[in-house]
Image (cartoon, rainbow, N blue to C red):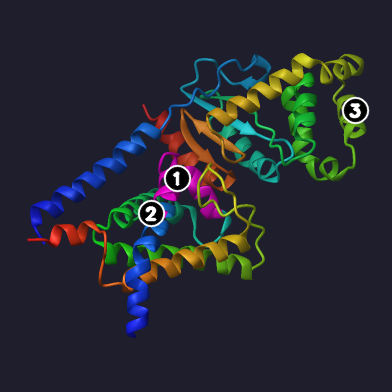
Amino acid sequence: MNLSKKAGAGLLLLSLAVGAVWVGRRTPRLSEGTPSYRQKGPAEAPVVLVEYSDFQCPKCAQAQPVLRDLLNRYEGRVRLVFRHCPLPSHAWASLAARAAEAAGRQNKFWEYADVLYSRQAVWSAAPDPRALFDTYARELGLDEARWKKDVDDPAVEKIVKDERARAEQVPISATPTFFINEKIIVGDSQLEAVGVRFMEQELRP
Amino acid sequence: MRESFRRFLMAWAPVFRGLAGGVLTVAGYAKAVRPPAEFAAVLETYWVLPVSVVMPLARTIPWVELLTGLALLTGFFTRSAAWIGAGLFALFLGFLGQSLLRGLDLKSCGCFGAWGPALTPRQTLAWDTLWWALCVGVGMDREKRWTLDRWMARP
């Protein structure tokens, strides 16, 4: 076999593969338009951690202790930004996102999100979790009438829908997906194994 | 090799090559354009290996799939590519088989990254077995019709 022909063909195939992959890769815009009540930590923090999550996803609930540890360890040096990504396969994920969003309008987004995650097994299995969501709102001392109105507000529904559509454009293929200064991390075990190491790297002077 | 089988392979190997090469190219490309963390998360659901091993694998496998697929499609180092392809499908079958035996709840095989189809484990088992067999068929064929190898071997 002619060696130069062989080398040429090999090089051509390799260039074709590398070129096609390079063209196919997209740079995502991750957290544009996230309201302030879904962000915590200093605005000028050197690390921005964007979380794409679904309140009904068990893996997302599992990731919360890991995330909490990470935020405690790097307190003051990291800003967390939450993005809704309710999966269509989860019947109550959108409603839960709207409930948390409505709580956010009363500056209790994080508290409501914590309750949703910690009691996920209960409301997720309920035939209709609306009554449970009402109870959580009461427990957190929300203005219930206002909260209920906001849950059904078409503007709130639009926020959740738009964010879900944006997540598809990124594209997010699984929840939870995290971005630490644009480095993608999927799932709680990666957050634990890779996240800490990457965070250290980003915070190194 | 029996003569009838040899003739069968000679006639059908280009088709097998096109099909297996096409599938490997698409599957490899769909994963290579996405961050390795996504495929790593899929590999983690099979619960075979720790994250430290899964990440390098998630970086490598899509490229091996893509390059093997292109080599099969064009018929470049055809038989080597076919055996590598067969090895890849055997690896996937191994991952999948042990997960099914352990009763793990796999939602999707992750074969095509974020692109469809999202196959169930049993569909994937049948699917991968078929592609493995096609690759073995191409690997056994010595005629290599309509390949770059044959074209380049011309004086």
For disc 3, the marked residue is A134
Helix, strand or loop at mark 2:
helix
Where disc 1 sits, the SS reads: helix
Closest to the camera, between mark 2 and mark 3, is 2
- The residue under the point 62% across, 20% down is A39
Q: Is residue A92 left or right of residue B142?
A: right
The residue wearing badge 1 is B31
Along the line of sight, the residue nearer the viewer: A4 or A105:
A4
**Chain that bears disc 3:** A
Q: Quadrant of residue B19?
A: bottom left
Q: Which residue lies under the disc numbered 2?
A: B65
Is residue A127 found left or right of A95 in the rendered image? Answer: right
Q: Is residue B2 magenta?
A: no
Res B75 quadrant in image: bottom left
Tell me if residue A54 can be seen: yes
Label 2, label 3: how many angstroms apart (C-alpha)?
A: 50 Å
Q: Which residues are magenta?
A: B24-44
